[in-house]
Image (tube, grey):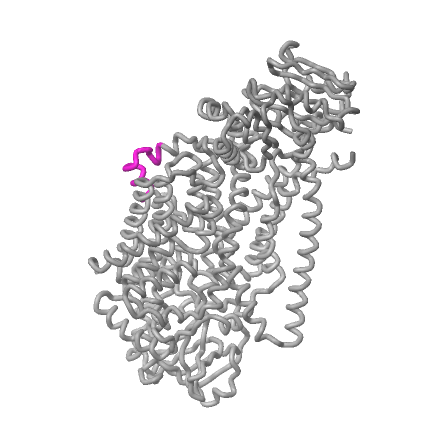
Amino acid sequence: MKRMGMRNYTISAALRACVLLGFALFFFLSIQSGRALKYVHPRNIPVLQFAIVAMTLCAIFLFIEAWKPRRRLRSSRSLWVFIFPLVAAFLLPAGSTNAVSLAYASFNLGGSAGENLSDNGTPSQAAGNGLDENTYLEDTYDEEEFYKENFSDMFGAKAPEEGEKEADQGMIVVDTDNYITWMDDIYDNLEKYKGRRIQLTGFVYREDQYKESQFVSARLMMVCCAADLQTVGFLCKYENAAALENDTWVEIVGTIEEGEFDGSPLAMVSVEQITPIEEPERSYVYPF
Amino acid sequence: MKTRVNVITGFLGAGKTAYINAVLQDEKRKNEKIVVVQFEEGEAAVCPEKGVQSVILLHGLKENKTLDAAFLQALYMEHTPDRILIELNGLQDLEIIFQLFEQRYIRKNFLLENIICLVDAVSFMVFQNNLGEVFQKQLAYADHIVLNKGTALQTEALLQIEKAIKGQNKKAKIFHVGVWKDGFSENLVQEFQEASFYGRALGMKPSTVVSAAFLLFVFGYLVFSVVRGINLQGMEIDFIGFEAFQMVFISILMQAFPFMLIGVFLSALMQVFLSNETIIKCFPKKYGLGFVTAMFGGLLLPVCECAIVPMVSGLVKKGVSLPVAITFMLSAPIINPIVIFSTLYAFPGHPEITMYRVYFGLVIALAVGLVLAVFPEKNEAMLENTVLGTSCDCLYCSGYGEKEQGFCKKFRLMCLHAAEEFFSAGKYLVLGAALTSLFQLVIPNDIFLRLWNKEGLSLVVMMATAFFFSLCSTSDAFIARSFWNSFSTSSILGFLVFGPMMDIKNVLMLFGVFRKEFVLKLVVLITFIAFIMLYFMTSLLL
């Protein structure tokens, strides 16, 4: 009989191996193309590499296993669950960050990386609370020092050097690596930075209650993975702000001023020069 | 055509020979050339009668034969039978049969159709209690279990026996037979062939694969055309939600899969390389010491909560007592050095948050463990009933078991183990990730924030947030930090402590390991204890 020659009974193992290889391939390709960084924090990359090796190993042994007859059968029905994310991962491109931010990332203006969600969800309140919180923090411990002593080296985040800040009254150049550190510091110590010139990049972001001349030069902040993306940034004042389209990436040179947002003081960048740019390769910023 | 082989096993007096006789008398087998090989000294004799012409009787024991490849080969050469019935004593290890029928030559000419286990219902409990593992293995390997002499028992007792059999072997078909001397019913004999797993495989597999491929194609095409269509028409508004869902979903998986793989590999490593004794030694049977290891074990095994469920199932399989394993499950993701470090970092200048987190984590873990120890589970909590406590029930171990020696073979076994567990736990992770991403998109972030006024309520809100958002314990401190302005410290602790212990994906993964009732009980217990502790203790401490 013909059916005896067929080794149907081992298909399940082969399918499993394929699913594993599929995931390994997806991880590999996303790391290669840098797309992985759209999804997870860079520190996850080594773990992903481990996963690739582990999955490939498992797949190889499963393929060997597929050539042996098995006593007990496994239903391969539950594999469906795995095929869905695989298809989703391969067929859909990682969304443009801006679209994603519009869809779900809540925006937080002001305050440090952490202190932003307010009780009623409006940025103004967040900003106010953020400032209050900071005075509290400074009473108990010097936050800045704590960061630098303990963590900045390990995480590779470059905290602005104390000396540099004091001596160099030139332009503050905010880049992807030091974005959060600068942002926290500027929001926390507005007095110290008032009048300093600043250069930063971000995408244009607006909410309904902003004035005509206001927009936010925003970045998406990733703590761990895309599931916790938050929009952060600096409030900017610009005469022709209305001409700026949302979600376009711009490089800004301006001066830090004390602005006002819904009645509370807040650092604001008065824009002097604005240049449209391409979306940078690393579009997220990381608090560490 | 290959020679079909049926193995009939069971203890002395279970009615094997009577069963064989019934099979031989079956009309359908009239034209088959059958060889009956007995490796058993039975009371009854095989008596081919009524027109069945070509039955050859061999008595393995009397002729001093062993059941091996050479024997079968010789048999095949001499008789070229259509079917071989092998009667085995219940004490015979069935693994030998599996290994025998995996040999190339044997596979070419023979087909192991099914294993039929005859069980004497009257003496079932006696065997169960006295023979333990041997008996259970026999049940576990059978495709077809015939419960003999059932009429002599009350219905209740029969149900109990059936339940016990199901516990050992979910897939086997169970048949009831009256008093065996009356012979076996027509019905039963007709079912003789049905349990053949090759038959079943043929019925299902190719169609499943074809339909799977087809559906996959349809789904893929659909998605592809949707993506293209929307890009062309620029209707991005509708698409954004889906895109965002996909982003969150894939990112959670990308984050959790590698950590889960670490967990399953650690678990498999334990399963394959460490003996049960070593594990038990690490988690001493004495509750006191066991709990101490469970509470602080996480310091040495830095696993996050994605990895912990497979680890715990591995520990329980290795014979660690359930309360201790659960304590380990609850404390390890919190006492993990990476978690402590990231909490310290997220709350700079406030080491007390980290201290409280660890403290409450340990206390709640211990409390839950103690409750489970004081009120032990009556029924087996694990899904795959491993009463033996020693054997792994997975596909690759049964058949070879722990006989595999040498590093390479063990390594292979470890990978297979890990893959197996990856798939069994992973499907719940995928579901959990999908649910979580849905929640993140559907529930506006600030809805929880609107509800926070009262202290008790805000604790509940934070615990619920932790549960539904299923954040990884290595990074949830940073999220918690963002709530710090709006919430009291005790509710932040609720988020930090309860989150790693319980969240959607963990609960789903637990369903894959433990019985439903046990998981529900555990969820309620943990939630309750965590709430009480955090609510009252924080008011004392803070």
Q: Quadrant of residue B413?
A: top right
Q: Is residue B163 above or below residue A28?
A: above
Q: Position of residue A232 (x, y in %)?
A: 42, 73
Answer left or right for B56 relative to B291: right
Left or right position of A158 against B271:
left
Q: Residue B502: tell me if it is visible.
A: yes
Pick the front one: A101 or B314: B314
Quadrant in the rendering for residue B35 = top right
What quarter of the picture does the C terminus of chain B occupy? bottom left
Give how far across and how far down residue A249 sits, in percent: 51, 77
Eyeballing the image, is B65 above or below B358? above
Taking the image as shown, residue B207 lies to the left or right of residue B305, namely: right
Name the one closer to the observer, A53 or A17. A17
Quarter that holds the N terminus of chain B: top right
Q: Is residue A152 above or below residue A218?
A: above
Q: Which residue is drawn at 60% across and 52% down?
A: A80
Q: In which quarter of the image is residue B217?
A: bottom right
Query: Which stretch is magenta?
Result: B281-295
Q: Is residue B405 visible?
A: no
Residue B284 counted in the magenta span: yes
Tell me how many marks there are.
0
From the viewer's side, name the closer residue of B391 and B416: B391
Magenta stretch: includes residue B279? no
Q: Is the magenta stretch mostly helix, strand or loop?
A: helix
